[in-house]
Amino acid sequence: MTIKPPVTDFATDFDHTDPAYVADPFPVWDELRETCPVAHTDRYGGAWLPTRHEDVSAIAHDTEHFTSRTVVLGNGRPGEDALPAPIGVAPPITSDPPFHAQARRLLQPAFAPKIVDQYEIFTRELCASLLDPFVGKGSIEVSGDYAEHIPTLVIAKMLGFPEEDEELFRGFVQQILEAVDQPVEQRIELFQPIADYFTARIEEHIDEPRDDLTSFLLNAELGGQPLLPEHVFGTMVLLIVAGIDTTWSAIGSSLWHLAQHPEEVARLKADPDLLPIAIEEFLRAYAPVNMARLVKEDFDFNGCPMKKDDWILLSFPAANRDPEFFEDADKVIIDRKVNRHAAFGLGIHRCLGSNLARMEMRVAIEEFLARFDTFELADPDAVTWSPGQVRGPRNLPFTLG
């Protein structure tokens, strides 16, 4: 990673990879909402950070002034002539209207509730196989031993990829989402093994079609024509990236919270029907995902002079902590009645895989609570968090009771 000076003023020089921000962004958002609700930085070639729910929602819904051509904030921008809008580099999340609606509609059946339900048995058996070796033991590293494996292997199964490649998938995710400080040329070079891997899997599925999501994409059509090769490739990369780190982080953050609140563990054990409501609150309070946009043309947003190709970092986690939108926004209330959170995004790009993520979170927490009556953080200071646009615990040591 590039060595950069630490941030001393988040209003004028924010950096979402700054160690202090990564460790604890909540006070940063609180201060910015009061003093500079749309922060700016010259880093990454120029970027803006809205922190109020009102502003995040307005930008997320505005496809006239902002493009989703790329959604990972980093050094450089993909050229408009490389994979131009409306398709983008990873459709449909990088697609603009009107193409976006077609690309999204194509994928919706694959993530419908009835389809997601078919993966619950696999997910539950997977969680059991990961946790059973720790029953009767004194400790577990929840992220590396448990949380990160769940969405990795579920997505691998959906795509028809070898389960033994799961370590590769986690490496792909970290390279794409966390290594944003690297020079553009280096990121392109490091992406080549990822491109080679997906190309090989596509070729295998062309030679041997299967009943999985990869073959579904290869057989799909838009407007009576097969999907372009770059569309198939980009969507598969999206599913690996968006389907792994996000859910892994959400599971880890939820268990991190519960490890510090034994009274809430007791409530959930006594009333299992409360868990789905609690999951919505964990999603609100510890939303893992930030999403980027680019400014289409010079544009004044509420007094902010945005320039063409400036980044916008849509902080859905900050929006979820806005006291103007949520009562007791800084408190985690596991039986919160009204919870219109933005953890899955806002606008046309709201997460297509929300049903899958909720199922994986529910099963992962159910199986953990079923095996361990008490658990706590072994060392709160040893907990580390991922940098970049998806925030979740990466080292999460628990003591098991």
Image (spheres, rainbow, N blue to C red):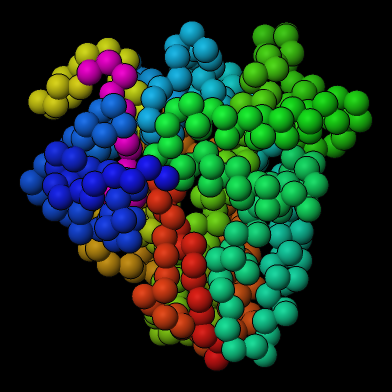
Q: Position of residue 242 (x, y in %)?
A: 55, 41
- Is residue 97 located in the magenta-colored stretch of the structure? no
Q: Position of residue 93 (x, y in %)?
A: 51, 29
Residue 71 in view: yes
Q: Residue at x 65, y 59 (%)?
A: 150
Q: Is residue 107 left or right of residue 6?
A: right
| As drawn, 384 above or below 262 | above
Q: Which residues are magenta?
A: 307-320
* Image coordinates for residue 309, horizontal then vertical, percent: 31, 19
Location of the C terminus by quadrant is bottom right
Looking at the rendering, which quadrant does residue 291 occupy?
A: top left
Q: Is residue 378 left or right of residue 357?
A: left
Q: Quadrant of the N terminus?
A: top left
| Residue at 43% from the left image edge and 84% from the top image edge | 262
Q: Residue at x 53, y 14 (%)?
A: 83
Inspect this view and state whether residue 276 appears. no
**Rendered residue at 55%/86% (across/down):** 400
**Is residue 311 found inside the magenta-colored segment of the image?**
yes
- Which quadrant of the structure image shows residue 218? top right
Residue, far front: 3
